[in-house]
Amino acid sequence: MQLTRHLGNEELREMIFDRDQQRLQQTLRALPERARAATEHPAAFWERQQAEIRKRIAAMPEGSSWQPVTAWAGAFAVVVLAILLLHNGPQPRPSRAESDPDQELLVAVEQTVQSGVPQALEPAAMLAEEISHGQPISTPNRVYKENSSEDP
């Protein structure tokens, strides 16, 4: 006991493992002898066993009517289970085309692209159109600071 107090955790584990391994080896070495001793019975014992087995075989009815009933019951249960699984399968989902917000957004974007220019950008579109056609931009109220500040 005094020695185990000075041992570390790892050393204690090894010591316990070694002891357990020794006990297991002793048990396994004694196993064949114990098995032989357990099976060694007098001839009278085996004769009684044989007689009992023969009585049970003779007591069984020759044409058991339960076998066909059991087979039909099992087959019926399988059929009912299959019907229930097929009937209660996953319900079809409603089609997404009916009210799909993504589809609605796509249609709105497509209409906006086909219409030309969004309303907020119409003034810029008009300006770009005038520039691209080479027409002068009409600016009657434009005041040039450079011209007014120049002295002749």
Image: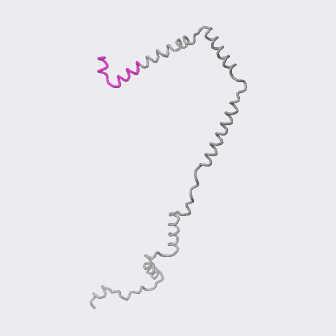
* Magenta-colored segment: predominant secondary structure: helix
4 magenta-colored = yes
Closest to the observer: 135 or 30?
30
32 magenta-colored = no
**Quarter containing the N terminus:** top left
The x and y percentages for residue 116 are 50, 76
The x and y percentages for residue 82 are 63, 44
Figure check: 119 above or below 57? below
Q: Which residues are magenta?
A: 1-19
* Mark count: 0
Figure check: 152 above or below 82? below
The part of the image, by quadrant, that contains residue 123 is bottom left
Closest to the observer: 124 or 77?
77
Identify which residue is drawn at 60% across, 8% down: 42
Closest to the observer: 86 or 38?
86
The x and y percentages for residue 106 are 51, 66
Q: Most extreme residue toward the right, as rendered?
A: 63
Identify which residue is drawn at 47% across, 16% down: 27
Is residue 46 shown left or right of residue 146? right
**Quarter containing the C terminus:** bottom left
Q: How did the renderer colour the structure?
A: one colour
The x and y percentages for residue 128 are 45, 79
Q: Most extreme residue toward the bottom, as rendered?
A: 152
Identify which residue is drawn at 61% across, 10% down: 45
Figure check: 106 above or below 63? below
Identify which residue is drawn at 66% across, 13% down: 51
Closest to the observer: 49 or 124?
49
